[in-house]
């Protein structure tokens, strides 16, 4: 366990592209105590230390049944593993953050059941910028109205397993919530980390709202912000919009307190 750190954290899928970025950031930040890190049961990393400076913490196939009170679990493994991870977290009382995308209906039902006992935050995209994009897109759809056609483009690296992306679908859901639909076009190209563009094309003008992920560390940063938020929440389902709202309230308070 990492010394001089106070907030207990465990990560499923710790050796993946996103999981390893999360491990690196949690170890670097110093305010997190990594209590558990899982890899797939067939991984050659099982039993290996996470880093040369963390010899006591090794990759495991499962999280130990006992973790320190308040441990937040972040799942960035595979869609087919999430339901079991949710059942374990609910049983143990660990707040759970799910960053995995491409979840099926059975897994979504397992997460809804877990949310009756623990706080569960579903984040197909950990970026605060994307959470804001969802809100801007809703606002644009409402203001511009039906004269504007809407299209979503999702571009990701060639190894991404699901299409359309979880973020593309969540942008589409945000639009559906205000009565609009949009076709999602997915491209899988090279090493692109993740680009999402929403275009509004109307009479004589086009509004294009776009977000580009430039560094995987951005997702790790957002996931840790979500973990900070979720540890203080009651059972229920949360999303990055809730993290954004808490952040907005905090910043507004800081602005109000500024001497005039
Ligand atoms: N929320 C966000 O902001 C965000 C950002 C990027 C990606 N994602 C999503 O996060 C997920 C992971 O993405 P990635 O790019 O990091 O994929 P990845 O590199 O394939 O990482 C997934 C890791 O999970 C491991 N794994 C498989 N089964 C497991 C199990 N039962 N328990 C623990 N670990 C297990 C895999 O190990 P093996 O390779 O040995 O099977 C792999 O190392 C995907 O669903 C992706 O779409 C979300």
Image (cartoon, rainbow, N blue to C red):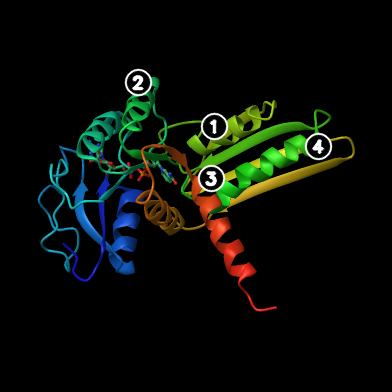
> How far from the left and from the top, in percent, is residue 6?
26, 64
> Which comes before the other along the chain, label 1 or label 2?
2
The Cα–Cα distance between marks 1 and 3, rounded to whole angstroms, is 15 Å
At a point 22% along the width and 58% down the height, the residue shown is 34
Instruction: Please state which of the two labelled residues, at mark 1 or mark 3, is closer to the viewer.
Output: 3
> How far from the left and from the top, in percent, is residue 51?
19, 63
Q: Which residue is mark 1?
A: 169
The Cα–Cα distance between marks 4 and 2, rounded to whole angstroms, is 37 Å
At a point 51% along the width and 57% down the height, the residue shown is 214
The Cα–Cα distance between marks 1 and 4, rounded to whole angstroms, is 21 Å
Displayed quadrant of residue 25: bottom left
Helix, strand or loop for disc 2: helix
> Which comes before the other along the chain, label 4 or label 2?
2
Q: Which residue is mark 3?
A: 241
Labelled disc at residue 108:
none
Please determine whether, in this image, residue 189 is positioned above or below residue 232: above
Q: Residues within 10 Å of mark 1 (few under 14, many from 20)?
A: many
> Which comes before the other along the chain, label 3 or label 2?
2
Please determine whether, in this image, residue 39 is positioned above or below residue 260: above
Helix, strand or loop for disc 1: helix
Q: Which residue is mark 4?
A: 144
Q: Would residue 225 be visible to someone looking at this image?
A: yes
């Amino acid at each position: 366990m990492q010394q001089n750190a106070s907030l207990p954290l465990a990560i499923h899928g710790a050796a993946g592209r996103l999981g390893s970025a999360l491990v690196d950031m949690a170890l670097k930040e110093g305010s997190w105590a990594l209590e558990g890190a899982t890899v797939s049961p067939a991984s050659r990393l099982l039993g290996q230390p996470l880093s040369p400076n963390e010899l006591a913490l090794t990759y495991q196939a499962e999280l130990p049944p006992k973790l320190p009170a308040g441990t937040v679990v972040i799942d960035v493994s595979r869609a087919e593993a999430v339901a079991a991870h949710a059942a374990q977290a609910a049983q143990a009382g660990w707040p759970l953050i799910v960053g995995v995308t491409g979840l099926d209906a059975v897994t979504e039902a397992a997460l809804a059941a877990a949310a009756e006992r623990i706080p569960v935050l579903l984040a197909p995209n950990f970026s605060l910028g994307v959470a804001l994009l969802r809100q801007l897109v809703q606002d644009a759809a409402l203001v511009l109205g039906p004269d504007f056609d809407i299209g979503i483009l999702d571009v990701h690296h060639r190894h991404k397993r699901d299409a359309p992306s979880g973020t593309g679908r969540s942008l589409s859901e945000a639009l559906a919530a205000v009565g609009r639909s949009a076709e999602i076009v997915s491209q899988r190209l090279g090493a692109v980390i993740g680009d999402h563009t929403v275009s509004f094309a109307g009479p004589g003008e086009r509004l294009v709202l776009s977000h580009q992920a430039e560094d995987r560390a951005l997702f790790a940063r957002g996931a840790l912000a979500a973990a900070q938020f979720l540890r203080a929440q009651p059972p229920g389902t949360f999303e990055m919009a809730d993290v954004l709202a808490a952040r907005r309230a905090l910043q507004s308070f800081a602005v109000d307190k500024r001497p005039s």
